[in-house]
Image: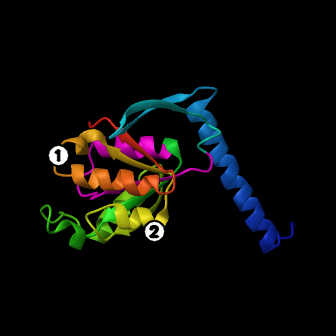
Amino acid sequence: HKKPLPPSYRSKLYHKTLLLNKTLLLDRIFGNRRLPIVEDSPMGAKLFFITRSNVMNKTVYLGITGDIIHPGIINIITRGAQLGELTVGLLTDSAIVNHKRLPYLSYEQRKQVIESIKGVAKVVPQEDWSYVPNLKKYKPDIMIHGDDWQHNYLSKIREEVFAVMAEWQGQVVEIPYT
């Protein structure tokens, strides 16, 4: 009959297991490869490569309404998770109401759906239509967004995001809209 492990040892073992699982996942994603990422900014596009080593400690932020989950949302969540630990800023009903129709699902229902998607580390409320308040609060290394905001009604917010991310040398990664 085995004695149970002390709580402190169990906790250390749990964290080592999490780290091992993350390491195995990153090995599976990257192997010995470098994944190309195009970063677009008002100054022009530039290409950089991400590797397994520069993903380990990066934090990534993605803001979404999360009402209708389509392949484009899954694509951007997958790409965000490849870049680091993905936090999804889920827009609240009050953040959405003046800009779009109200979502079909309640905030809590949308949160439950988003939390269940592979690659999402955590979901936080985004109380404002602009990403800026949450970006200042969480200070992610990377903010990810679809490239559709370059030439639509979100272009002003896009400029604000680039300015605020530059305050702490954060990157904005734009994924081709699908």
Distance from Cα at disc 2 to Cα at disc 1: 26 Å
9 sits left or right of 105 in the view? right
Write the residue at 33% across / 63% down: 90
Q: Is residue 177 above or below residue 144?
A: above
Per the image, label 2 sits on a secondary structure element best described as helix
In-front residue for pair 58/3: 58
Residue 58 highlighted magenta (yes or no): yes
Q: Residue furthest front?
A: 43
- Amino acid type of the residue tagged 1 in the rendering: Asn
The C terminus - image quarter: top left
Picture coordinates of residue 175 (x, y %)? Answer: 35, 38
Q: Which residues are magenta?
A: 56-81
The N terminus - image quarter: bottom right
Q: Which residue is mark 1?
A: 152
Residue 65 picture quarter: bottom left
Picture coordinates of residue 96 (x, y %)? Answer: 20, 66
- Amino acid type of the residue tagged 2 in the rendering: Lys
Q: How is the image coloured?
A: rainbow
Q: Is residue 116 visible?
A: no
143 sits left or right of 84 in the view? left
Write the residue at 78% across / 73% down: 7
Q: Is residue 148 above or below residue 85?
A: above
Q: Which residue is mark 2?
A: 137
Per the image, label 1 sits on a secondary structure element best described as loop
Q: Are marks 2 and 1 in contact (CB under 8 Å)?
A: no
Picture coordinates of residue 71 (x, y %)? Answer: 29, 40
Q: Is residue 56 visible?
A: yes
90 sits left or right of 152 in the view? right
Residue 112 picture quarter: bottom left
Write the residue at 26% across / 45% down: 70
